Image (cartoon, rainbow, N blue to C red):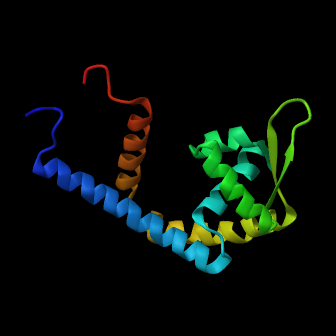
Amino acid sequence: MDKNELNEEEMRIWHMWKGTFQSIFGRVVKEMSEHTGLSEADYGVLDRLALLGNGSLRQQELADSMDWDKSRLSHHLTRMEKRGLVMRKPIDTDRGVQVSITSAGQSALDDARPIVAKAIRKHFLDRLTDQDITLITKLAQSTKTGPSASS
């Protein structure tokens, strides 16, 4: 079989994996959004600001951490600024912009974290066996390093 094609079984596995992830992720985001009013993107910005930058990051670092282009992030930050969740200010020493979480943003993140944790546990972790966790961990680690040299 051509390595550039997938057989029926491989496509079935791919769609099953993708569908399962999307379903779980969708349920977690839905519960968070219903309880907090934050979108998945809002939570991603706030969470990264808190975890990676202790509340503040250069806009480009934030974009890189989210794998977003500058324009997409800039538009989203404008909406978040209007809601009082973040603030931006130019960096004096260069052309960069510093993005900081506001007290309202930190409060929203603090409110969202237990809801997200509970939803992840309910829709994902509580359904896994120790063997499942081992296999998922092994799969995640192998995708970070790419295919083995013998592949």
Horizontal side of residue 23 vs 108, given as left or right: left
Q: Residue 13: image x %, image y %?
A: 22, 53
- Residue 142, above or below 98: above
Q: Residue furthest left?
A: 1
Q: Nearer the viewer, residue 66 or 125?
A: 66
Q: Nearer the viewer, residue 22 or 125?
A: 22
Horizontal side of residue 105 vs 68, given as left or right: right
Q: Which quadrant of the rendered structure holds the N terminus?
A: top left
Looking at the image, how many numbered discs can be counted on the residues? 0
Q: Residue furthest top?
A: 149
Q: Residue 149: image x %, image y %?
A: 31, 19
Task: Determine the residue positioned at 64% across, 43% down.
Answer: 70
Horizontal side of residue 17 vs 47, given as left or right: left
**Does residue 75 appear in this view?**
yes
Task: Determine the residue positioned at 65% across, 61% down.
Answer: 43
**Does residue 127 appear in this view?**
no
Q: Quadrant of residue 67?
A: top right
Q: Which quadrant of the rendered structure holds the C terminus?
A: top left
Task: Determine the residue positioned at 72% across, 44% down.
Answer: 52
Q: Quadrant of residue 6?
A: top left
Q: Residue 116: image x %, image y %?
A: 60, 67
- Residue 9, above or below 65: below
Horizontal side of residue 15 vs 89, given as left or right: left
Task: Determine the residue positioned at 69% across, 44% down.
Answer: 62
Q: Residue furthest right?
A: 92
Q: Residue 29: image x %, image y %?
A: 54, 69
